[in-house]
Image (spheres, grey):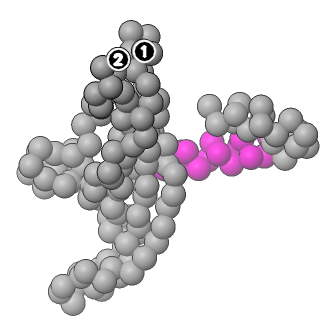
């Protein structure tokens, strides 16, 4: 948990401030869980959130409905299991772009980087434990099911 990391790193920080930061972090995570695909925060951490203009909107209606974009950047956590501890961390992959449900008149785009590892032979290994997108699309699994009519 990040709170324990903060506690280890900032032992000189006033205890009240640290408690406040941990409480705010809990609220931040709760809000993020409402916005992001279910379960993604179990495997990934948010590294950056940016807002921008929807400059790629082609139709006037789209410009009115979604004038802004929300970009969320996520990096995979170290999810190695006990038998995989011999794999050595080797950075991250290029980001996979996943489109998700719009949020408050903002199109939501996720930039997700998976962790790379090196095995004992020096070959790259990527542990795929979380399905990022509906096969054949750039849409999150939930968003893809919604569009395919699987929700009713």
Q: Mark 2 near mark 1, Cβ–Cβ under 8 Å?
A: yes
Q: Does the magenta stretch include residue 116?
A: no
Farthest bottom residue in view:
60
**Secondary structure at numbered mark 1:** loop
Residue 34 left/right relative to 148? right
Q: Name the residue under label 2.
A: 120
Name the mark nearer the viewer: 2 or 1. Answer: 2
In percent of width and height, residue 45 lies at: 49, 43
Q: Mark 1 or mark 2, which is nearer the start of the sequence?
A: 1
Q: Mark 1 points at which residue?
A: 86
Residue 114, quarter of picture: top left
Q: Determine the residue positioned at 55% across, 45% down.
A: 29
Q: Determine the residue positioned at 74% across, 46% down.
A: 21
In percent of width and height, residue 77 lies at: 46, 34
Residue 106, quarter of picture: bottom left
Alpha-carbon span between mark 2 and mark 1: 7 Å
Q: What stretch is highlighted in magenta?
A: 19-34
**Secondary structure at numbered mark 2:** loop
Residue 77 visible within the image = yes
Q: Does the magenta stretch include residue 22?
A: yes
The crowd level at tag 2 (other Cα within 10 Å; few <14, some 14-19, many 20+) is few
In percent of width and height, residue 87 lies at: 40, 20
Residue 129 visible within the image = no
Compared to residue 127, the image places residue 30 above or below, namely below
């Amino acid at each position: 948990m990040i709170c324990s990391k903060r506690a280890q790193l900032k032992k000189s920080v006033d205890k009240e401030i640290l408690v406040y930061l941990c409480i705010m972090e809990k609220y931040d995570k709760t809000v993020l869980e409402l916005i992001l695909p279910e379960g993604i925060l179990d495997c990934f951490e948010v590294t950056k959130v940016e807002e921008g203009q929807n400059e790629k909107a082609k139709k006037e209606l789209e410009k009115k409905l979604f004038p802004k974009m929300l970009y969320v950047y996520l990096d995979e956590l170290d999810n190695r299991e006990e038998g995989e501890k011999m794999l050595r961390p080797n950075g991250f992959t290029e980001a996979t772009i996943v489109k998700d449900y719009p949020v408050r008149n903002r199109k939501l785009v996720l930039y997700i980087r998976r962790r790379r590892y090196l095995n004992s032979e020096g070959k790259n290994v990527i542990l795929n434990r979380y399905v990022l997108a509906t096969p054949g699309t750039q849409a999150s699994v939930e968003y893809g099911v919604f569009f395919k009519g699987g929700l009713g």
